[in-house]
Amino acid sequence: MKGTEQRLQRALRSLEGLSVGDAFGEQYFMSFEMAARFMASGQLEGPPYDFTDDFIQILIDRRELPTPPPWRWTDDTALALEVVENLRRYGEINQDALAHQFARRYKIDPMRGYGGAMHSLLPELAFKSWRVAAPALFNGSGSFGNGAAMRVAPVGAYFADDLEACIANAARCAEVTHSHPEGVAGAIGVAIAAAWTWRLQGPKMPLGADFLDLVLPSIPASEVKKRTVQALDFPDDITGEEVADILGAGHEVSAQDTVPFVLWCVSQHPDHFEEALWLTVSGLGDRDTTCAMVGGIVAAPGEIPAAWLAAREPLPLS
């Protein structure tokens, strides 16, 4: 019982980091109204800017938080809540139950930023087996979107003491909605990274290529793994924007163009939550999702800023 409770506490800590990262990153999809309000406040001086990523990049470079709380979280957190609840109930990923949980969560609150495929799939999971519905996506190839990776960090935290179980349960968690091998590989990469941050928190935490070398052996052969290998040779002075241009940062909303960037960001600051998140959001792209992944991974050794935690929309935890 004690071991199970420790595992659950790790998963809950990862969920906190994931949700804060998700909500933080989401703020940088700034609306015209938000940008106008920010500029009218006098916090940003200079010529008029259009409300595009150029404007947002200025805010990120200055580390300006662009909107007052509450910071609303997205589908990343909504589904991660169900993953943690599934682990609490069963002690491992129960795929049939998880599919029904996802369907119920979607029905309760469908306006959380779900992708088009999930708007189609998640309602089906209430009455159709995920074993049929998920592989049928995209003309039978299954989804390789980044949705499986965005919710899986708590699985890595939960099974940090058993890497084989971590890999197996990350794959199970992915398959319910993302049955394509790339989607599964992305989920495994994030989960294993989260497991390692729990296992090595403290002064022995490896950085850069040393951290990636711990994660890579567990990722199945895939484009996700191939792009992550690229990151081993990046120079020390490369920027987050440059890495995003090379690896992708979620513009294609795929595991392949999201997870390698995330793993590189984590490798730079595996024990510093705030620095890891600022680096991640600097890549722009699918910034709520990349920040959710990173937040869930680095929540173990990295202290979540109290102001960010307070600003995040409350979680509906029982």
Image (spheres, rainbow, N blue to C red):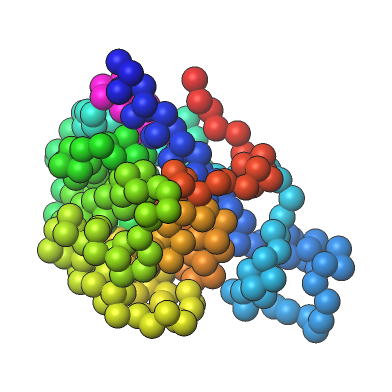
Principal SS element in the magenta part? helix
Q: In this view, does 146 lie to the left or right of 48?
A: left
**Residue 152 placement (x, y as % from top left):** 33, 44
Residue drawn at x 26%, y 22% as measured from the top left: 90
Above or below: residue 140 compared with residue 45:
above
Quarter where residue 205 is shown? bottom left
Residue drawn at x 33%, y 18% as measured from the top left: 2
Q: In this view, does 84 lie to the left or right of 133?
A: right
Does any portion of residue 258 appear in the rendered image? no
Specify the segment rendered in magenta. 81-91
Q: Which residue lies furthest to the front in this view?
A: 203
**In magenta stretch: residue 114:** no
Dividing the image into 4 quarters, which one contains the N terminus? top left
**Residue 156 placement (x, y as % from top left):** 30, 42
> Looking at this view, is 170 or 14 the one in front?
14
Q: Is residue 86 left or right of residue 69?
A: left
Residue drawn at x 31%, y 74% as measured from the top left: 231
**Residue 284 placement (x, y as % from top left):** 51, 69
Does any portion of residue 15 appear in the rendered image? yes
**Residue 134 placement (x, y as % from top left):** 20, 45
> Looking at this view, is 173 or 9 the one in front?
9
Quarter where residue 41 is shown? bottom right
**In magenta stretch: residue 84:** yes
